[in-house]
Amino acid sequence: MAAGMSPVYFLARFRVPDVDRYRSEYGRAVLAQVAAVGGTLLAASASPTVLEGDWEADWTALIQFPDR
């Protein structure tokens, strides 16, 4: 990361009715696009641990980008 730049984080929460299809048809393509702009998938889970409140999603992903 260049000096003076701050990373940006993107948290995605969404519903995935067919996880296998999502991974094969959508997930891989998205990861390639994220990587092409310097992003990194930090975490992805179908069942994240919720510490407080409600989490109405069945897939969660955290992506870091080098800057805005």
Image: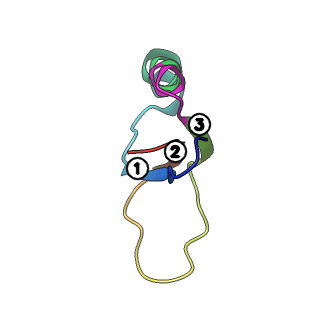
Q: Which residue is mark 2?
A: 63
Residue 50 is drawn in which quadrant?
Answer: bottom right
Mark-to-mark CA distance, 2 and 3: 6 Å
Quarter of the image where the N terminus is located = top right
Point 39% across, 37% down: residue: 17
Quarter of the image where the C terminus is located = top left
* Mark 2 and mark 3 residues within 8 Å of each other at the beta carbon: yes
Point 61% across, 68% down: residue: 49
Q: Position of residue 37 (x, y in %)?
A: 46, 25
User: Please, what is the three-letter code of the amino acid marked with disc 2?
Assistant: Ile
Labels 1 and 2: the sequence-earlier one: 1
Q: Secondary structure at mark 3?
A: strand
Q: Which of these two is toward me, 12 or 33?
A: 33
Q: Which residue is mark 3?
A: 40
- Taking 20 as reference, is 3 above or below it? below
Mark-to-mark CA distance, 1 and 2: 8 Å
- Badge 1: few (under 14), some or many (20 or more) residues near its Cα, within 10 Å? few
* Range shown magenta: 33-39
Q: Which residue is mark 1?
A: 12
Q: Which of these two is toward me, 2 or 54?
A: 2
